[in-house]
Image (cartoon, grey):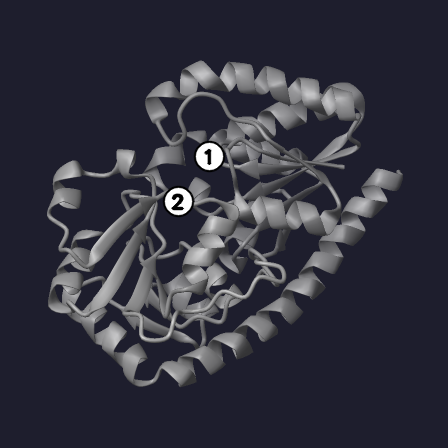
Amino acid sequence: MAALVWAPEENRTEQIARHLDAHLHTIHYLYYKRPFFAPFKYVPQTLKTLSVLRRQRAKVVYATNPPVFAVLAAALYCWRNGATYVMDTHSPALYSRKWSWTVPLQRFLARRALLNVVDQSRYKALIESWGGRALVLEKPIAENVLGDERVTPQPGSPFTVTVINTFAVDEPLEPVLEAARRLPDVCFVVLGNTSLADKRLLASAPANVSFPGYLLKENYWRQLAVSRAVMALTTYPFSLLAGGHDGLSLGKPLILSDQPALTDFYTKSAVFTDNTAESLVAAVQEIQQNEQRYIRESHELAAEKRELWQASFAALNSIIEEAASG
């Protein structure tokens, strides 16, 4: 079995591929998250996809959407080689303006997929209304992400909040910087590729804000591990932020936007904000005052979500194994 994602790294797909014992192909050329370059890289990425899948002779391909053209490339391989594909659709592909023009193609591919994996029941209903088969499977809550390495906040170090961020249009950054100005004794570490950010906004950041860039793998997990809280914000109502899942993986208190998808999922361990500086300051202070309670709730919720995930994954694995054996 093969798992496919058109990105330099995608944590959700990587974790699911590991559970499926699938060979993961991360295929990507030129710059990442730069729409101008998309027409120039999608053709070579399609050719590379067809090549690696033919070489592997995959019977089932687990393909991540967006971009939907990665799934289209997997479908082309499957149609020519008697294989089948699972389309894992991340919710922004279905509601963001950036990808709205691809919905007809998503609908076409969803109807022909062995299965469609989504992270919320509202999108399962949508896929089924298109005539596709769908299953809800959130990003897994990772375990033992740093192996035997023990990384914790250093005694006496400043209270550190890591902001899981990509400088996307739905991620409010200005209120984070204003909250940092009002909390000079708190360190804010804002992740993400700074080449995608507004340089004037970065220059305006107070001294207690740092921008380490886009961290990968162990560096990413170490940064979360040394933090006292994890923040992830969005203006989208139905974005189930993966940053919250990653915070749960390490038992961290969470600061999240007060959006329906998030309040439905994070029933404890989180302080919800309205994306204003005032509410962010109040959220940080709430966690500072009740840190142990939020840590305990984070561990509890992670255990609950892992149990639910295992049941959903078992259903997915059964469908794939049946297709592969057939």
Q: CA distance from mark 2 to mark 1?
A: 9 Å
Image point 66% across, 27% down: which residue?
75
Image point 49% across, 65% down: which residue?
151
Of residues 229 and 318, the one drawn nearer to the viewer in this rendering: 229
Q: What is the three-letter code of the residue carrying label 2?
A: Tyr
Of residues 96 and 35, the one drawn nearer to the viewer in this rendering: 35
Residues at circles 2 and 1 in contact by the CB criterion of under 8 Å:
no
Count neighbours of disc 2 (C-alpha within 10 A) and say few if under 14, some if 14 to 19, many if 20 or more.
some
Badge 2 is on which residue? 95
Number of marks drawn: 2
Q: Quadrant of residue 166?
A: top left
Of residues 170 and 290, the one drawn nearer to the viewer in this rendering: 290
Residue 128 visible, this angle: no
Quarter that holds the C terminus: top right
x, y percentage for residue 174? 16, 53
- In this picture, residue 266 sits left or right of residue 138: left
Residue 200 visible, this angle: yes
Does 111 sit above or below residue 287? above
x, y percentage for residue 12? 56, 49
x, y percentage for residue 13? 59, 44
Q: What is the three-letter code of the residue carrying label 1?
A: Val
Q: Earlier in the sequence, mark 2 or mark 1?
A: 2
Badge 1 is on which residue? 103
Q: Quadrant of residue 262?
A: bottom left
Count neighbours of disc 1 (C-alpha within 10 A) and say few if under 14, some if 14 to 19, many if 20 or more.
some
Of residues 2 and 186, the one drawn nearer to the viewer in this rendering: 186
Does 235 sit above or below residue 53? below
Image point 57% across, 61% down: which residue?
149
Circle 2 SS class:
helix
